[in-house]
Image: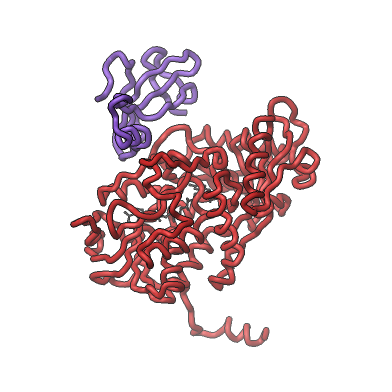
Chain colours: A red, B purple
């Protein structure tokens, strides 16, 4: 074995297998056109090709593969939501992460280490009890823990702060975890392209041509394509892309910022977040501390960081773990998040016959990458929205059947 | 730190202000259809251009209107609601 490896390593010409083929020429038409090559678009293409035998699929990505919010997110995977519809959906999402590396034959480094959310007030504790009961009822692992249990779960936490920010207890979500975001996208891309799906990078949809209540074609910077079915999964650009088809989504865009520190030895073995401090931390498998928090306070398309938000995140992190005060930041960034009025996504039908929506993923869509892909593929293949997606339809904003996840999403992950 | 010019208090750090969301003309609640009312509640002002929105200067609790560009982030003007509301 070592000899063979050495021989392979020193060989002059050994086969290099790329996981994702180079962008091919555009064909004139495709059965399915997916606009947006982030995790969601790629997952949908994977499910279409593997489980529905639909391989005449083009993914159109204006930049590079998964360079949108998939590249920017802080990779919190959890199902501790509050509405029964939301919990059922995200729960399946977490379960699919459990089998993803096997399914994709690609190590996505899923680490189900549990998520601890801290309460600094009785009010928060009360809302945690409600969430825990809902979670248990729906079959997720979720319980309210007291100060002593918080300390056991995360011994490095500063429990002596006192005052209004004393830690009173927490919400322990054993199902919570994290995965490597790039690997998730690349795994889906590799598997989908192996089955014939075409991934077109640097291909921007400039207009969507509608006639007779259907999308007839899309015009890109590389030419026009006729399409059977179309799905929009454009992250922060969902509102603008849907507008090209004349569909006005109830979405407003807010920047969301995050940052990572220099890598250090593994010490933080859970995901930790605080509702009152609007800060959460996770240690990546490289040892970097990924720190995220609440959205910017006002609407904007800017993806620039602001000093006050970064200071706020640093403050929150040091508050929880004072020994982090000398850490250096390695990188910081922001993404444009497509926020809906009720903090739930918009999936399923649009006012046009063959246009499908996988939008409104705001600050919470990475965890849903596999489950949204699975059911959006089913939707497109059958031309019918499956029951699990029905509550997330765009029509809920005219029938006043909102799915309020604001409380369960307040810390934006 | 960004500066926002309050019509009453002059230029201030933007952290002194609270963003209260886009200005929307309210339809008559007695006459409006459910669809119009839903539009009023959930319609999004989200184009990459200028929008008019409500802001509040927190220390003085003064509420005013600002026209801001969502793409560039530039504040175009700020004004008191008595100076006329957009239709
Ligand atoms: C800082 C930050 C932290 C986050 N943290 C978490 C978290 O911890 N957990 C979680 O679950 N979620 C989190 N999210 C949200 C999550 O990142 C997104 O909801 C999710 O990645 C959306 O995936 P997507 O594939 O739909 O969109 P994206 O990954 O944004 O992909 C959309 C793609 O569409 C392309 N596109 C846009 N316009 C066009 C066009 N006209 N033509 C062709 N292509 C186009 C874009 O270039 C982009 O690559 C976070 C987001 C941010 C910004």
Q: Position of residue B49 (x, y in %)?
A: 29, 36
Residue A163 in the figure: left or right of residue A19: right
Q: Position of residue A304 (x, y in %)?
A: 44, 41
Residue at 31 percent across and 63 percent down: it is A229
Q: In which quarter of the image is residue B42?
A: top left
Q: Which of A136 and A408 is in front in this view?
A: A136
Q: Position of residue A15 (x, y in %)?
A: 49, 82
Q: Nearer the viewer, residue A51 or A139?
A: A139
Residue A252 in the figure: left or right of residue A130: left
Res A259 visible: yes
| Screen quadrant of the N terminus of chain A | bottom right
Q: Quadrant of residue A358?
A: bottom left
Q: Nearer the viewer, residue A352 or A204?
A: A352
Residue at 33 percent across and 73 percent down: it is A56
Residue A306 in the figure: left or right of residue A168: left
Q: Where is residue B7 in the image (x, y as percent from the top left)?
A: 36, 15
Residue A378 in the figure: left or right of residue A286: left
Res B76 visible: no
């Amino acid at each position: 074995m070592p000899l063979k490896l050495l021989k392979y390593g020193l060989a002059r010409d050994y086969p290099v297998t790329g996981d994702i083929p180079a962008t091919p020429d555009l064909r004139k038409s495709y059965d399915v056109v997916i606009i947006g090559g982030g995790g969601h678009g790629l997952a949908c293409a994977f499910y279409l090709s593997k489980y529905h035998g639909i391989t005449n699929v083009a993914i159109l990505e204006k930049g590079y593969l998964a360079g949108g919010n998939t590249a920017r997110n802080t990779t919190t995977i959890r199902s501790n939501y509050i509405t029964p519809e939301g919990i059922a959906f995200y729960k399946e999402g977490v379960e699919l992460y459990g089998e993803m590396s096997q399914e994709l034959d690609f190590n996505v480094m899923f680490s189900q280490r549990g998520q601890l959310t801290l309460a600094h007030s009785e009010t928060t504790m009360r809302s945690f009890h409600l969430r825990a009961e809902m979670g248990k009822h729906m079959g997720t692992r979720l319980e309210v823990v007291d100060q002593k249990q918080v300390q056991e779960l995360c011994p490095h936490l500063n429990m002596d702060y006192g005052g209004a920010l004393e830690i009173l207890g927490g919400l322990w979500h054993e199902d919570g975890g994290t995965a490597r975001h790039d690997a998730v996208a690349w795994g889906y891309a590799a598997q989908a392209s192996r089955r014939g799906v075409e991934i077109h990078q640097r291909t921007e949809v400039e207009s969507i041509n509608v006639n007779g209540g259907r999308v007839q074609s899309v015009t890109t910077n590389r030419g026009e394509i006729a399409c059977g079915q179309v799905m929009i999964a454009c992250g922060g650009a969902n509102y603008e892309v849907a507008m090209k088809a004349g569909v006005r989504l109830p979405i407003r865009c807010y920047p969301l910022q995050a940052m990572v520190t220099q890598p250090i030895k593994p010490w933080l073995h859970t995901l930790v977040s605080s509702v009152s401090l609007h800060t959460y931390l996770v240690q990546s498998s490289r040892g970097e501390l990924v720190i995220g928090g609440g959205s910017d306070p006002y609407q904007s398309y800017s993806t620039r960081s602001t000093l006050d938000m970064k200071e706020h995140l640093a403050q929150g992190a040091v508050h929880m773990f004072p020994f982090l005060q000398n850490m250096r930041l390695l990188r910081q960034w922001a993404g444009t998040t497509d926020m809906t009025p009720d903090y739930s996504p918009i999936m399923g039908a649009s006012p046009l016959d063959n246009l499908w929506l996988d939008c409104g993923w705001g600050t919470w869509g990475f965890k849903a990458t596999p489950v949204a892909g699975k059911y959006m593929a089913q939707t497109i293949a059958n031309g019918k929205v499956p029951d699990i997606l029905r509550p997330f339809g765009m029509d809920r904003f005219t029938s006043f059947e909102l799915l309020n996840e604001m409380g369960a999403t307040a810390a934006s992950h | 730190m960004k500066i926002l010019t309050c019509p009453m208090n002059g230029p201030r750090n933007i952290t002194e202000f609270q963003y209260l969301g886009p200005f929307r003309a309210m339809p008559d609640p007695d006459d409006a259809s459910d669809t119009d009312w839903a539009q009023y509640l959930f319609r999004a002002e989200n184009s990459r251009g200028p929008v008019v929105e409500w802001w509040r200067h927190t220390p003085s609790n003064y509420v005013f209107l600002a026209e801001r560009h969502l793409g560039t982030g530039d504040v175009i003007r700020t004004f008191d609601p008595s100076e006329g509301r957009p239709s």
